[in-house]
Amino acid sequence: MRCSILLCLLLLPAAAQTSPIGQPGGESRSPRPLGSVSGRILDAYTGEPVAGARVMAFNLRAPGPMVAGMSNADGRFSLAGLPPGPQYVQAMHPNYPGLLGLPQGGVYIGVQPDRETTDVAVKLLPAGVASGRVRDDSGEPICNCVVILTQAQMGNSQPQVIASGTTDDRGEFRLAPIPPDRYVLSTECTARLPEEYPLDVVGPYGMEPREAWPRVYYPGSRTRAGATEFGVAPGGEQKIEFRLKRQRVGNLRGVLTPIPAGTWSDPPRIYLVPSAPEESANYKVTGINRGNNSFYFQSVPPGSYELKASAQRGSRESASFASLHFTMGPATPPPVTLQLHPTMVVKGKVDAPPQALAGTGQGKSISYVTLNPPTFSEHMLALSGTIDTRDGSFQIAGVTPGRWTIGYGSSLGPTWIEAMQFGGTPVNGRTIEVTADSSAELRLSISSKFPTAQLELQMRSASPDTYWMVQALRASGSIIERPVQAGSGFAGEKLRWGLLPPGQYYVSGVPQSYSGEMINQRLAELLRRELQPVEIPSTSGKAISVPCFSYEEIQRIATAYITGEAQ
């Protein structure tokens, strides 16, 4: 019996090889012949070849594996094994970041079976450069200054640091390659200034500085709000010169007092945060002396600050915090006392259908409410609390006074906050203010019903083979909103509105890309200037006209913004 089984197993591969594949009657369908493409990757401004670029070809009308390769020293590339039909050829290179950090544009070609499509030219827009010098008011160079390049504010987007560098012994810096965009530039020099000190003033911290170089935003502002924006165009170089003047600084010391009978498992951290919201990222941080709970900040410029501290004894419920408004003058102030207080617990309830909380059958829900700071910072992190599936109650521990944005999530699927109350008062938007003596309850009404609508793509100039990503940006200006995908497809297809709640949106179509993300915060904010908000009602059936922007149109709009023509 065992021999019979072994004989059958040995015969199986041979039988499989001789079995007909494909059509009935034993006739097999031969695979369709493939094609290839070759060409060059070039600098769009100089026409010079770009070596080491990653080249990709893909057909979105017939999804399949993407074919990729690299350009050689002459910028030449060759891609084989391409299915016949329309293909989109795109390239990327680390030294060629696209406009606003977007992917570079490509070209559409037609691939023929058993033939090579030749002389395809893919052009990459060159990056920009920001360079310059940092000097003192007498013209002498200042070395070892940190120079930081940050995106200019655009709408409600959160500007990101794009590049940073350090001045050399001639006070010079050069930041490259950088994406063509609008920026602000700041510098901070930490070099100690020479001063004369009487021996009798040397204290436990050594010779404390009385003057320092200030943090400066170009051309000479102490705050980001007073900075002058500038554009860096493709292939362009923006030259910046800083002239710094010494400023008087003080040195802040103090003592951190724990809550009664309180201890901490990890040493607390003390933060000195500028009061101006746009400067909150420029905080200083220090630890404490475990022997006497003292802390010390050196070289603090005059200004308004918040002293903050946090400590924890294991769980969040046992956390404590401290906050003190403080104004620094030109002279060193007397020591301050920073008193820790117990953090608060925000309690609430979620009103939702039972199946939205507990799930049905095998599906068990994990639902939660989150408190998020309006902007990210190390001294104020996001908090969350799990919802009790029996009654919808929740509590979030470790909450400190301040503004918090409310979020909701569930493992059962997409949902949205239909209405919200804090302390019995309706909340417009999603932000609440938590005070030190607050005991208000947070109530959320949750819905899993989303409006449906038909998306009608309106193309002005683009290839019919363009695959469009529909992005939606909420029109609310009270909090930072990020664009989300509301649909995707080709022109002429019936597209449906994605899982987004009712409200006002800026809706636009942008081309799909395999070399980077086109649904981009800065692009969405830029395109909203070209759009009118669309109202998405809670009812179904509305037709939404979606203006689609080709890569060439996006390039034209972005270039006008960068050069200041669209300010």
Image (tube, rainbow, N blue to C red):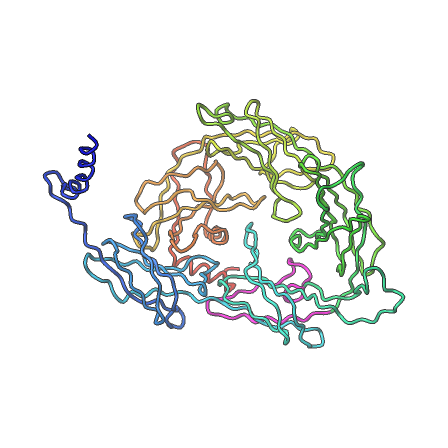
Considering the image in quadrants, where does the N terminus appear?
Answer: top left
Quadrant for residue 554, please give it: bottom left
For image coordinates 78% across by 62% down, the residue present is: 249
State left or right for residue 539 relative to residue 167.
left
Q: Quadrant of residue 186?
A: bottom right
Q: Residue at x 37, y 55 (%)?
A: 550
Return the residue found at the far left. Answer: 25
Residue 191, image quadrant: bottom right
Q: Give the x, y percent position of residue 417.
A: 53, 33
Would you place residue 327 above or below residue 427 in this image? below
Give the residue at the far right of this rendering: 200
Q: In the image, is 243 to the left or to the right of 33?
A: right
Of 57 and 544, nearer the camera is 57
- Residue drawn at (17%, 33%), measured in percent from left and top? 4
Compared across the picture, whether 494 is left or right of 210 comes to left
Does residue 74 appear left or right of residue 444 in this picture? Answer: left
Question: Which percent across, then down, holds residue 224?
Answer: 64, 58
What x and y, as percent, mark residue 528?
Answer: 48, 50
Give the camera-side residue of 516 and 276: 516
Q: Nearer the viewer, residue 531 or 376?
A: 376
User: Could you say where residue 293 lies in the image, as x and y percent from the top left?
Assistant: 80, 48
Q: Image height check: is 317 above or below 524?
A: above
Q: How many marks?
A: 0
Q: Within the magenta stretch, is there residue 116?
A: no
Query: Can residue 235 be found in the magenta stretch?
Result: yes
Residues in magenta?
A: 216-245
